[in-house]
Image: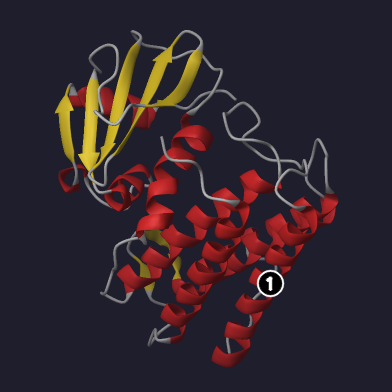
Amino acid sequence: MEDNLEFSGLLRLIDERSAAFRAAVASAPDLEARVPSCPEWTLFDLVQHLGGGDRFWAAVVGAGPADVPPAEAVAERAAVASGATVAAPREREALSAWLAEATELLLSALREAGPDRGCWTWWGASQSPGDSGGVARHRVQETSVHTYDVQLTLGAPRPLPDEAALDGVEEFLSTCCATTSAWPHKPTAFDFHATEGRSWRLTVDGDGARFTRLPATGEGPEKAGASVRGTAGELVLFFYDRVPAESVRVDGDAGLIDLLRAWEPED
């Protein structure tokens, strides 16, 4: 079984993906272009979202163990989301500097905290830890997927980097899928197979949803209700609704995938 990425590797990937995001934004001819994968946003909106997210999580990590995120960070994020405040400058060089500063604020907070310092997270009922390491791991995915969004807007989408994508499958299952809320349908299991040679199972029943790694054979003790196969990058983009179902191979009961996508656990 492969280990998760080391904390230092997560910080490196945040830095690398953030640089790729800035480079893609810098080459965009129009910051008011609509983002196909986030149709309610322009590129400028996406920039504010990612840069603001880096700043928000820097404040969260810096605050340490807490039951709620810092009030000032929440207020600032809400003001930007509502349009009451424009956080990012529109001039290109200033915008790139603003993004770079946001990333460095996040990285500095993570370096100071180390991988195991507790902090508030929204994924309290999941299998992901509520600490700075969990934040770093999720920010890798947030930045990677939004870099893809910018590239898609420019008409030149690129595959997610293998390292980020392979970790991203498990990160999504453990953070966004795992829950203690009861699955409202007949118990079943979903298998996800990356063509790079790793596989995971998401089991759903009355106790909620939880993921496990499958052995190298990719086979679980019982047959899954549905399975999805693709490159790790395709799986991550499928999870985040960036690519259609036709981009991956679905075996078994495809209707179960629709149920999983539509499920909104209470916690």
The number of discs equals: 1
Relative horizontal placement of residue 75, taking residue 165 as reference (left or right): right
Where does the image place residue 131, in percent across and percent down from the top left? 71, 42
Asked whether the viewer can see residue 80, the reply is no
Residue 76 occupies quadrant? bottom right
Q: Residue at x 69, y 37 (%)?
A: 130
Q: Of 191 and 122, which appears nearest the observer?
A: 191
Residue 223 vs 193, above or below: the answer is: above
Residue 144 vs 214, above or below: the answer is: below
Residue 200 occupies quadrant? top left
Q: Quadrant of the N terminus?
A: top left
Q: Residue at x 40, y 59 (%)?
A: 38
Residue 178 vs 249, above or below: the answer is: above
Q: Residue at x 33, y 47 (%)?
A: 241
Relative horizontal placement of residue 49, taking residue 253 as reference (left or right): right
Where does the image place residue 215, in percent across and percent down from the top left? 32, 27
Q: Residue at x 46, y 20 (%)?
A: 209
Where does the image place residue 238, in percent across and percent down from the top left? 30, 45
Where does the image place residue 226, in percent across and percent down from the top left? 23, 23
Residue behind mark 1: 104
Disc 1, SS? helix
Asked whether the viewer can see residue 179, the reply is yes
Q: Of 116 and 254, which appears nearest the observer?
A: 116
Binning the other alpha carbons within 10 Å of mark 1 as few (below 14), some (14 to 19) or many (20 upward) gives: some
Question: Coloured how?
Answer: secondary structure
Relative horizontal placement of residue 206, taking residue 247 as reference (left or right): right
Q: Which residue type does callout 1 highlight?
A: Glu
